[in-house]
Image (spheres, helix red, strand yellow):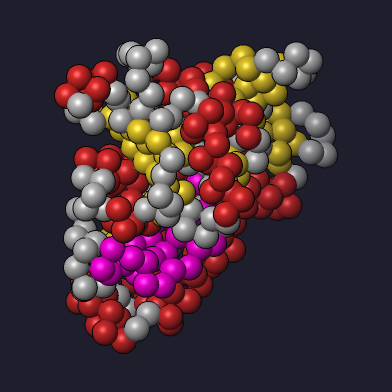
Amino acid sequence: MGLFNLFSNDMGIDLGTANTLIHISGKGMVINEPSVVAVNKHTGKVVAIGMEAKRMLGRTPEDIHAVRPMKDGVITDFHLVEALLKHFIRRCQKYSFFVRPRVVCGVPSGITEVEKRAVMDSLTSAGAREVYLVAEPMAAAIGMGIPVEDPSGNMVIDIGGGTAEIAVIALYGIVCDASVRVGGDEMDEAIILYLKKTYNLLVGESTAEQIKMQIGSAFPLEEELEMEVKGRDLVAGIPKTLKLSSAEIREALTEPVNNIVLAVKQALEQTPPELSADILDKGIVMTGGGSQLRGLDERLRQETNLPVNLIDDPLSRVALGTAKILENIDKYRKVLLNSGR
């Protein structure tokens, strides 16, 4: 078994809508790249994957199409996800010809059986020997070092690119959860729509993401921010520059932020009273890339009257959790969504 493990690079994978992260035992985080694939429309051949493909979003010639094969945390294009995983797994596998890795992969808690099967098939086709799935909020909790085996309740909010998942965790299980298909991508779309309706200005996904990161907020800021935005004037059809304030972008983000707040309230309403008392003591922990939106913690504090804590390095927590599960699979077997194969 020692020799077997020597050549096997067991992997914890966070296959996200926006980013794919891979953690390998003993090596740490080896992949953290956008879940984007660029394809030649005529030949169907994959031209670029990851960071290289993301740079092409909205900038490609007619025959090349840069796409995200994941939407709302689930696979929309099986073949492209397979190509993406194969590419990343090959990059990680020094001895890929020798031993296929065991993989633990984080998936949305609201995933259907069909979607589960698609993830498992993609990973198996990409070279995995055994595949185990775990709900992302559970993986994030383990990645944050929360003792999920305790009878005491913990509430985790994981906001990714495609989903916001809220889960109350105790005794290796998710006691109650709410999953909404709202995340960073919906926030970007809301910004694109707002600029189109308000200013007749058309901007791409990358620009919308930049606006969200630079001046986006969910709660009034002590000092409001401003930035210059370049796009295309839909009336004149020529490039145009515009100055935007953080107050306007907050207005643009009202709907996605409200949906997240509503899901948190729903999860709290379903929580058994004993666990509610635990959450009142410990507060809510936020993780995932979308949790970095300015003032989102403050907004949730105001809406729930509970302490809300934003974790350090929120992007990597699901991948870290999957890696911890791999290190002690017998201890964490109860948290897995399937028996593996």
Confirm whether residue 48 shows in the render.
yes
Q: Is residue 165 magenta?
A: yes
Return the x and y of residue 34 as percentages of the image width and height.
48, 31
Q: Residue furthest front?
A: 1
Is residue 100 positioned above or below 133 on the image?
Answer: above
Is residue 36 positioned above or below 43 on the image?
Answer: below
Which quadrant holds the N terminus?
Answer: top left
Q: Is residue 11 toward the left or the right of residue 128 in the image?
A: left
Q: Residue furthest left?
A: 2
Residue name at image x 34 percent, y 37 percent: 12
Residue name at image x 35 percent, y 14 percent: 98
Return the x and y of residue 143 as percentages of the image width and height.
26, 48
**What is the total number of numbered labels drawn onto the structure image?**
0
Residue name at image x 33 percent, y 65 percent: 173
- What is the span of residues highlighted in magenta in the rendered image? 155-180
* Prevailing secondary structure of the magenta residues: strand
Return the x and y of residue 269 as percentages of the image width and height.
43, 82
Decide which of 103, 256 is in the foreground and name it. 103
Decide which of 208, 96 is in the foreground and name it. 96
Decide which of 312, 152 is in the foreground and name it. 152
Confirm whether residue 185 shows in the render.
no
Q: Is residue 204 magenta?
A: no
Residue name at image x 63 percent, y 34 percent: 78
Is residue 115 positioned above or below 306 on the image?
Answer: above
Return the x and y of residue 259 as percentages of the image width and height.
55, 66
Which quadrant holds the C terminus?
Answer: top left
